[in-house]
Amino acid sequence: MTASPNRLVLWDIDLTLVDLRGLGGSWYTEALASVAGIALEEMPRFAGRTELAITTELLTAHGIEADDELVQRVWRELVALSTRSLPTLSGRGHALPGAQDALAALAGHGVVQSLVTGNLPEIAEHKLSAFGLHTHIDFGIGGYGSLSAHRPDLVERAVALASAKHGTTFAPGAVAVVGDTPHDIESALHHGAVAVGVATGWYGEDELRASGAHVVFGDLSDTAAVLAGLLR
């Protein structure tokens, strides 16, 4: 079915579609040692934050100036670690309940699907392809964590890229942003998009509703309910 130019769903990855808890900290530990020769002593918070925010905070916390060159070196090392891990990545975690069916069902309705994720583009693709969740995602129009420390900027970028590719303007109410943290919800609300919370991460359903989510799911296992919520 041809993708609908009137509906766009932007997915978060970690603890929304896949659970790879602990992986980011492990990779950052290795990257910091490799790039700066320093043992990681203080782990930044990852949930809902972008790679630019996390890397900058991590370097600063260890007394290192987070200039662009060093940030880029850390990112190259993270991508290298992810690439080397790809053959065994599926053994480090699992796809979350209903993720595969939700992606397939939306594709069946001709919905354009991409990402708003704190991950780097290469790592985003690795994490989803490891669990066969990449098929229905247009990675070329995503908003990624290398863009900005401010998550709403990622939504703006993804909507702009999707609009340009499909030759249309996606109305705010026709864009749904799906994630497991208040940061995801806030980024959706900032743009007037439909904010959809999934309580498969560190935040419960009540916390996601309190952050302003229009729709909240315990997980994605009820495909009919997910479709109803995202196509509202």
Image (cartoon, grey):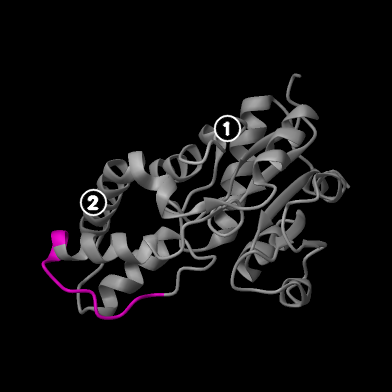
Q: Please state which of residues 17 and 71 is positioned toward the viewer in this rendering.
A: 17
Amino acid tagged 1: Asp
- Left or right of 171 in this view: 16: left
- Identity of the residue furthest to the top in this view: 1
Residue carrying label 2: 77
Image: magenta residue range: 34-44
Residue 13 position (above or below residue 9): below
Residue 57 position (above or below residue 154): below
User: On residue 153, which mark appears?
Assistant: none
**Rendering coords of residue 200 (x, y %):** 64, 64
Is the residue marked by circle 2 packed among few (<14), some (14-19), or many (20+) residues within 10 Å?
some
Q: Main secondary structure of the magenta part?
A: loop
What SS does tag 1 mark?
A: loop
Residue plotted at (75% across, 72% down): 205
Residue carrying label 1: 138
Amino acid tagged 2: Glu
Q: Quadrant of residue 5?
A: top right
**Rendering coords of residue 139 (x, y %):** 52, 35
Residue 35 position (above or below residue 159): below
Residue 127 position (above or below residue 24): above
- Left or right of 68 in this view: 147: right
Residue 29 falls inside the magenta stretch = no
